[in-house]
Amino acid sequence: MDRIVIVTGGSRGIGAATALCAARSGYRVCVAYLNRQDAADAVVQEIEREGGEAMAVQADVGREADVLRLFEFVDRRFGEVTALVNNAGILERQMRVEEMDAERLTRVFNANVVGSFLCAREAVRRMSTRYGGHGGAIVNVSSVASRLGSPNEYVDYAASKAAIDTLTLGLAKEVAAEGIRVNAVRPGSIYTEIHASGGEPGRVDRVKARIPMQRGGEVDEIARAIVWLLSDEASYMTGSLVDVSGGL
Ligand code: NAP
């Protein structure tokens, strides 16, 4: 059976590294992105240069119509999806909880939580043996923030990742007997552009002294864990929350 993966937020950072790593492992890859078509196209071109197969699809994971369109596009172009990486995620400017307004909270929970639920739903509808599918694997990208809380920075983001942990635990049990494994990777502080959204592009270097391994992580170190969890090497793992955080 062909291995087909959708990586949300595949245009940049951890998602782009995951798309490349999955392609090197033999997956046909759908690189889903929000705005940065240039970055998504560059990932697709790199995969193709290496002899793999990929396509870029624009979809806001927080919009149900976009998620439906994304999965239908993959059905038509590639066939039955076998893996999903729920990686798209945002954080907003660092502030305390008492400064956060409803618009911000809605944006963060919509992109991080609603988006992951909708994509997981569409994946289950295709992969589950309950609906005639052939099984598959889902990896949700959470964060160690879910157990640290991110005080004074983004407690909303941390809480959204705690919801991702719970989605992972609950969904894993729901579909375990239907051929689908669901796990999460919880990265620590990784060098990507996400920290600029918080207003501190150099955040990883500021906090690295607090990380037991004394350094930030590289995107490939997260991507390898994600692709391993998707693979048959992790065949008896489901409902696991795997920290990849240098000991944090
Ligand atoms: P990033 O470099 O900021 O990239 C974010 C990606 O998500 C981009 O591809 C972006 O698309 C996409 N995206 C954002 N909102 C979206 C939406 N509503 N619909 C679809 N796609 C959307 O982020 P990153 O650091 O690689 O983070 C990836 C994941 O890892 C996130 O879930 C994040 O919470 C998690 N994480 C990161 C760290 C870290 O230290 N970096 C630590 C723990 C967890 P465009 O390119 O089109 O904008």
Image (spheres, rainbow, N blue to C red):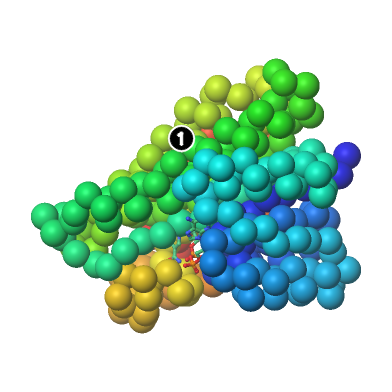
Which of 38/92 is in front?
Answer: 38
- Residue 12 visible, this angle: no
Q: How many marks?
A: 1
Q: Quadrant of residue 19?
A: bottom right
Residue 224: quadrant of the picture: bottom right
Q: Is residue 86 left or right of residue 90?
A: right
Whole-percent x, y for residue 195 in the image? 38, 72
Q: Amino acid at mark 1?
A: Leu
Up-down relation of residue 164 to residue 33 (above or below): above
**Which residue in the structure is indicated by mark 1?**
167
Residue 118 can be seen in this image: yes
Quadrant the C terminus occupies: bottom left
Is 214 in front, or is 58? Answer: 58
Please state if 9 lies on the left or on the right of 202 as rendered. Answer: right
Mark 1 residue crowding within 10 angstroms, few (<14) / some (14–19) / many (20+):
many
Identity of the residue furthest to the front in this view: 65
What residue is rendered at 30% in x and 75% in y? 199
| Residue at 61%, 49% in the rendered image | 85
231 vs 185, left or right, is: right
- Element class at badge 1: helix
On screen, residue 163 above or below 248:
above
